[in-house]
Image (spheres, rainbow, N blue to C red):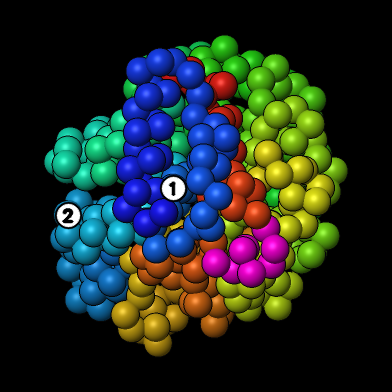
Amino acid sequence: MTTLNRRQLLAHAIAASTLAGSGLTSTVLRASTDPIEYDDLPLVFNALGGIGNPNLRLAKAENSQEAVGESGTYLDARALDDLRASGTTAINVTLGYVSGDSEPYEYTVNEIARWNRNVEAYPERLVKVLAAADIETARVSGRTGVIFGFQNTAMLGGDASRVDTFAGLGTRIIQLTYNGANAVGAGSMVPENTGLTTFGRDVVAALNANRVLVDLSHSGEQTCLDAIDATSAPICISHTGCRALSDLPRNKTDEELRGIADGGGVVGIYFMPFLAEDSFPVAEDVVRHILHAINVCGEDHVGIGTDGGTTAVDDMPAYHKLIDDEIARRKAAGISARGEKPGVVPFLPDLQGPDQFRKLARLMAKQGLSETVIEKVLGLNFLRLVREIWGR
């Protein structure tokens, strides 16, 4: 079977499932016994990533000028071309307040409006995802589904009913905490490891009621375990690593990983320096963490959330200087995580660019993972989860 036919097979399968109301399963993808070519990918769901050109950000820093597009977005033709070339079917992009001096609620509403404009500006490239069917539509039409997600709940203030507002504006994934503490609970860098607050339990209930996917990335261990206990729906950790392999706070213990899986959720493994305790991992480390997560959670509960984009950095020495300055600012603001340090960029240098998912697929195959499992990790597991949470 040729790669083109494989792509056509999946497109027809997704279209048929959309029309018939049945789910796309790995059984459909296993209709052929031919091995994956990996020149084209069946479905990639990046549970946390970015869409932008980091070289524009570098140019802005060097020239003290606004980059192409609106400040903070760095969208250009190259970023969109690389996104398409990477095979990304759906991506959860972080918008809204994460940290800083801005008023969280106002800033977040403005960010949602800005990202609505971004999606509307590129209708031939992007689709705003409100339900799982939008991901299927994106794949069939050769576009990428953009999922609006938060990495903090500070924009809620003390009002859990604001979840209704943000859900109504199209937010589909909300992470409870960043690295520090907020009104909901403790982040991964809070030494006291306090758990989910009473307000936090109200927020989890509101997220469940609004069919918004709860994300426990960046949370402290006890907050994570408390949220697993509090939720009435499957939840996720969109981007993390395995603490058993790299003992850094941003990674999750086996107990946390197992709790997500036992509740029907999915854990996304990132392409971040926290995959190795010396903060200098390589592509093979991503596979090590995926294999460990599969051993703990099972093959139906592991995916990817790169925490990065698909456009490669052209000038690494200059980018190192930019990131070193940013790390210094993050440490001064008290929002950095252990493992962030000078000389370390927030991605894997040997796993950047639009070929990153093909390379990962080849590495997983080299380690003995079957075609079926690789397809689940690349996207089908998260697709199954959001079908359950958001509906078709």
Where residue 357 sits: x, y (%)?
47, 61
Q: Nearer the viewer, residue 85 or 370?
A: 370
Relative to 73, 176 lies left or right:
right
Residue 42's disc is 1
- Label 1: state its secondary structure: loop
Q: For the magenta stretch, what is the residue range?
A: 362-369
Where residue 20 sits: x, y (%)?
40, 15
| Residue 177 image-quadrant placement | top right
Relative to 83, 391 lies left or right:
right
Q: How many marks?
A: 2
Residue 69's disc is 2
Q: Earlier in the sequence, mark 2 or mark 1?
A: 1
Residue type at tag 1? Pro
Whether the magenta-drawn stretch holds residue 262 is answered as no
Disc 2 residue crowd, few under 14, some 14–19, many 20+, Cα 10 Å: few
The residue drawn where x is 77% and y is 43% is 297
| Residue 74 image-quadrant placement | bottom left
Q: Quadrant of the image for the C terminus?
A: top left
- Tag 2 and tag 1, C-beta contact below 8 Å: no
Q: Quadrant of the image for the N terminus?
A: bottom left
Q: For the residues carrying marks 2 and 1, which lies nearer the camera in this image?
A: 1
- Residue lying at the far bottom in this picture: please name it: 317
Where residue 360 sits: x, y (%)?
54, 64
Q: How far apart are the alpha carbons under marks 2 and 1?
A: 31 Å
Prevalent SS, magenta region? helix
Residue 193's disc is none
- Label 2: state its secondary structure: loop
